[in-house]
Image: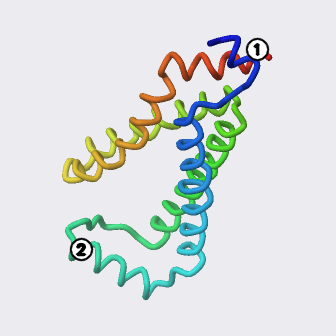
């Protein structure tokens, strides 16, 4: 198998799928959405959002400045997803490592947020599913071996 990988460099299908999700969905699409909200949010629109969140039971007291700061953090996260996805699609070991590190960071911060706000446990479960898939897949020995073989070229 190792010789075949050296000859063809065929990327595992899971790496292609997850790389595209990282790059295009969580990277480009989410960045565009967050940037759009950041540039178009007004105090009036912010109050409407807060009221909707209150009605759905997801309310936490936050100012418009804090909300905008969180959008900046999400845009930075989108950039990291884009870069890691691009690295995966380009068959780079650094893309796999960045994906793993970022996946672990997301899980850790999600767990810390649950400790700070136990009411958010349901959302935390949802927020850890995708990073969990990334961690599980990219620590698989065959996938790890694929990226390490290409790194030696």
Residue 58 picture location, percent across and down: 25, 65
Write down the quadrant of residue 112 in the picture: top left
Tell me the number on the disc at residue 65: none
Residue 126 placement, left or right of 68? left
Nearer to us: label 1 or label 2: 1
Badge 1 marks a residue whose secondary structure is helix
Tell which of 58 and 62 is nearer to you.
Answer: 58
Residue 88 picture location, percent across and down: 64, 36
Evaluate if marks 1 and 2 touch, with contact meaning CB atoms under 8 Å apart: no
Residue 85 picture location, percent across and down: 62, 43
Tell me the number on the disc at residue 152: 1
The residue tagged 2 is 54
- Residue drawn at (56%, 47%) of the image: 22
Badge 2 marks a residue whose secondary structure is helix
- Residue drawn at (54%, 43%) of the image: 17
- Residue drawn at (54%, 61%) of the image: 30
Tell which of 153 and 33 is nearer to you.
Answer: 153
Quadrant holding the N terminus: top right
* Other-residue count near label 2 (Cα within 10 Å), few / some / many at <14 / 14–19 / ≥20: few
The earlier-in-sequence mark between 1 and 2 is 2
Instruction: Name the colouring of the figure.
Output: rainbow
Tell which of 148 and 110 is nearer to you.
Answer: 148
Looking at the image, is 80 positioned above or below residue 50? above
- Residue drawn at (29%, 78%) of the image: 52
Label 1, label 2: how many angstroms apart (C-alpha)? 54 Å
């Amino acid at each position: 198998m190792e010789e075949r990988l050296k000859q063809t460099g065929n990327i595992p299908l899971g790496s292609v799928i997850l790389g595209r999700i990282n790059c295009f969905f969580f990277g480009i699409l989410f960045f565009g959405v967050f940037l759009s909200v950041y540039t178009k949010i007004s105090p009036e629109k912010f109050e409407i959002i807060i009221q909707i969140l209150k009605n759905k039971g997801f309310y936490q007291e936050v100012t418009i400045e804090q909300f905008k700061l969180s959008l900046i953090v999400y845009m930075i996260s989108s950039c990291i997803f884009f870069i890691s996805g691009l690295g995966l699609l380009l068959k780079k070991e650094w893309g796999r490592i960045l994906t793993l590190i970022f996946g672990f960071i997301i899980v850790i911060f999600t767990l810390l947020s649950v400790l700070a706000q136990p009411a958010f446990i349901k959302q935390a479960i949802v927020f850890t599913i995708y990073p969990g898939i990334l961690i599980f897949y990219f620590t698989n020995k065959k996938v790890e071996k694929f990226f390490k073989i290409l790194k030696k070229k």
